[in-house]
Image (cartoon, grey):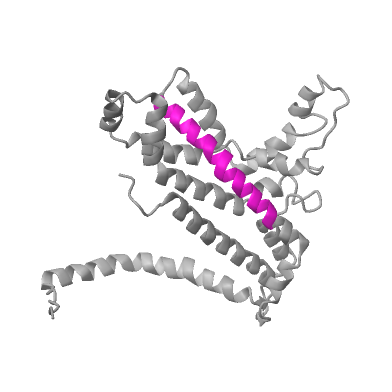
Amino acid sequence: MVKKQKVKISKLERRNYKWIYLFLLPSLLIFLIFYLQPIITVFYTSLTKWDGFNTPVFIGLKNYMDMFTNDAFRISLKNILLWSLIAGTLHVGFGVLVAFILYHKPKGWKFTRAVFMVPNVISAAAWAMIYRFIFNDDMGILNNIIRKINPDFHIQWFYESPYAFWAVTFTWLFYAVIVTLIVLNDLMAIPEELTEAAKVDGATGWQITRMIHLPLCRNAIGTGVICSITSRVAMYEQIALTTAGGPGDDTMNLPIILVKAIQDMKYGYANANGVIMFILGLIILAIVNRVFKMNESVY
């Protein structure tokens, strides 16, 4: 039977560990105070009836039962699922495409960079207000262009079903600068020797992109998918400033329900929505990590 050997730690190493723990202490305190404690509070108060002022009264799973029997909540889950699919495919795909254009630097790449980057500097709230004018029936650019062909065309994009859902989608669909920057950073880190070796072996540009660049950017693309989908789960400004969840509940989502619950002094119900958002974020993270094999090295 093989005896286990004990690894002796020198006094110098023990002293170094003490310094490591000391320097980690501020970060640990910040995590406990500003992250873990609020998360625990949200989970607990989601099981209570609480108006934000008086002592919370424990009611068990009633808030969750009320949520899942609420039509607005079920519609919001459906909307989040569809927006997540669009974000993980079209939104991220467009960002990756722009990243490859900027990486290869074809003719006009600087113009592409300016056209794509500059609008992304504008906040989501500002773009929501801009799109309210773009999609306005009377003075909007879109309808006025369509009326050049069809003079009788009249649609209030943000106030009519089913157009409102797609109008809200267009307020964020093509603004994928975060995805572009993440992927572009990984592209620029790929050793030139790999590309040169592939060219010597007779690989075409498309083969190099498909067989070398895309696989080596797997983690960056996965990170972009996580950022994009979680942004859709937490999306508030674009909806609040355009449709407010309407018409009916066509563009309803969890943050809108959460804010309305807070305005009605239903903090327990609002925090139950927050818990669902938190769980959705964890599920998204787990799925993307598994699909893109984020924990595995690409080299």
Relative to 220, 169 lies left or right: right
What residue is shown at x 81% (from left), y 37% (from top)?
A: 156
Give the x, y percent position of residue 92: 53, 40
What residue is shown at x 46% (from left), y 27% (from top)?
A: 101
What quarter of the picture does the C terminus occupy? top left
What residue is shown at x 38% (from left), y 35% (from top)?
A: 211
Judge whether residue 157 is colored magenta: no
Q: Is residue 265 visible?
A: no
| Vertical order, 166 against 297 (above or below) | above
Judge whether residue 83 is colored magenta: yes
Give the x, y percent position of residue 91: 57, 40
Name the foreground residue: 153 vs 48: 153
Relative to 160, 262 lies left or right: left
How many tags in the picture?
0
Name the foreground residue: 245 vs 224: 224
What quarter of the picture does the N terminus occupy? bottom left
Q: Is residue 86 visible?
A: yes
Name the foreground residue: 190 vs 209: 209
**Magenta residues, as a range?**
77-104
Q: Quadrant of residue 132?
A: top right
Give the x, y percent position of residue 107: 45, 17
Q: Residue furthest top?
A: 107
Q: Main secondary structure of the magenta part?
A: helix
What residue is shown at x 35% (from left), y 34% (from top)?
A: 188
Give the x, y percent position of residue 74: 72, 60
Relative to 33, 85 lies left or right: right
Relative to 114, 53 lies left or right: right
| Vertical order, 259 against 143 (above or below) | below
